[in-house]
Image (tube, grey):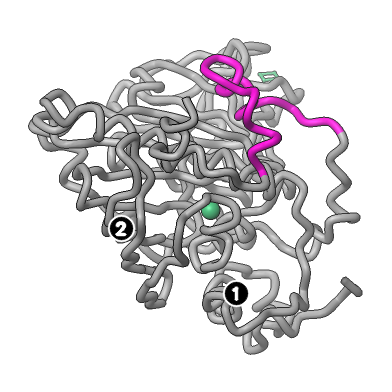
Amino acid sequence: MSDMKQEDARTAPVGVWQVLESLRGEELTKWRLAELDNVSSVEMRNLDVLPYPFGWFMACYSDELAIGEVKPLQYFGRDLVLWRGEDGQPRLIDAYCRHLGAHMGYGGKVEGNNLVCPFHAWAYDEQGCVTDVPYAKRLPPSATKPPATQYKTCEENKAVWFWYHPYDEAPKWEVDRFDEVFNADWTEFDKHEWIVRGPIQNLAENGVDAAHFKYVHGTATFPDYQMSFDGHKRTATVEAKMGTPKGEIDGKISYGTVGPGQSWTKFSGISETLLISGVTPIAPDRIHIRFAFTQPKEEADGPMQGLAKALKKDICKQLDQDKVVWDRQKYLNRPIICDGDGPIPAFRSYFSQFYAEWEKEGKKTITSLDVDKKSD
Ligand code: FES
Ligand SMILES: [Fe+2]
């Protein structure tokens, strides 16, 4: 057994391992979504300094929303209701009926392309305007006007996305499309999900945090990567040692983020893999992370399938390891950075563009390292 341990780079003894070592299979899957005890408050962890970032965010996978299906969602501290009309289009509005406040995600039904409230059958269109009250002679004029908050939706990469902006500004970019997702020679999605008790910024910063790869993920070396920031996009290419059951192998990873809510990673060198992920805030200290893997079928089902599976397992394990830290991490406005750290200040400056509240308050020109409303 001890020989096995040395060969298997995935069992490298990292600090977070004590939390994860007893978790396997079903238990591990449950832990990924479980409520946690002893997590300090949003204020104690300084998370109230960070607004919700704007952008496109994943609402669900396309196959989780059939025509005529109604789904309650809780994202951005709001109760929302999502449905798919008879025309196949997804629609999202605030969940509470403007009549007497029923939650339309529970018992609401689809008629045509509209959503009908379960309480007194008022019907809503995708803008949240009331289109019909079956027992009224005249529609209340204010009900026919759209509410201030609107959610644009789109469907891409076999997922439903919605646009969040705190001041209801129109979408500023599109969700990136990946042809592999629609290629019949690539596998259907292999899906995994987590709830992490922190804001998106902490998670996104992980990609530029060079030093943690060794101490959290047990890589033998620090990754050597090229990073670029371009408008709402960030891309990087990393040459890294990848843990496999046969030891470490040189792999190449390219990854990118498209705004704060969409990211993708392509692995080559071991087994061609595309990981599409969606990160959606539930509350200031809670995010929903979805990972969907696709691989060429001839690699995923062929003689190299062991490696193809090990790669996905290793990536999910890395998320587990990060989660142990993220779940209780505090946000520091003025972190002390050393010369071996990655481009953390550049990343924070890039990410602050998604905080519309900061721009409104005139903080846009300062890097977030200088934004010091609170003492750390
Ligand atoms: S509360 Fe929705 S129709 Fe009355
Ligand atoms: Fe990480």
Residue 38 % position (x, y):
87, 36
Q: Which residue is the site of mark 1?
A: 348
Q: Amino acid at mark 1?
A: Arg
Q: Is residue 36 on the magenta stretch? A: yes
Q: Residue at x 65, y 23 (%)?
A: 22
Q: Nearer the viewer, residue 275 or 57?
A: 275
Q: Quadrant of ligand 1?
A: top right
Q: Residue at x 27, y 51 (%)?
A: 267
* Residue at mark 2: C-beta within 8 A of ligand 2: no
Residue 253 % position (x, y):
30, 58
Q: Is residue 226 left or right of residue 287?
A: left
Q: Amino acid at mark 2?
A: Ile
Residue 185 % position (x, y):
8, 32
Against 104, residue 331 (above or below) is: below
Q: Residues within 10 Å of mark 2 (few under 14, many from 20)?
A: many
Against 218, residue 112 (above or below) is: above
Q: Quadrant of the C terminus?
A: bottom right
Q: Which residues are magenta?
A: 16-37
Q: Which residue is the site of mark 2?
A: 253
Q: Nearer the viewer, residue 249 or 73?
A: 249
Residue 351 % position (x, y):
56, 70
Q: Is residue 353 left or right of residue 242?
A: right
Quarter of image, res 195:
top right
Task: State whether residue 305 appears in this view.
Answer: yes
Against 150, residue 5 (above or below) is: above
Q: Is residue 166 on the magenta stretch? A: no
Q: Residue at x 35, y 60 (%)?
A: 240
Disc nearer the start of the sequence (2/1):
2
Q: Is residue 357 left or right of residue 83?
A: right
Task: State whether residue 154 appears in this view.
Answer: no
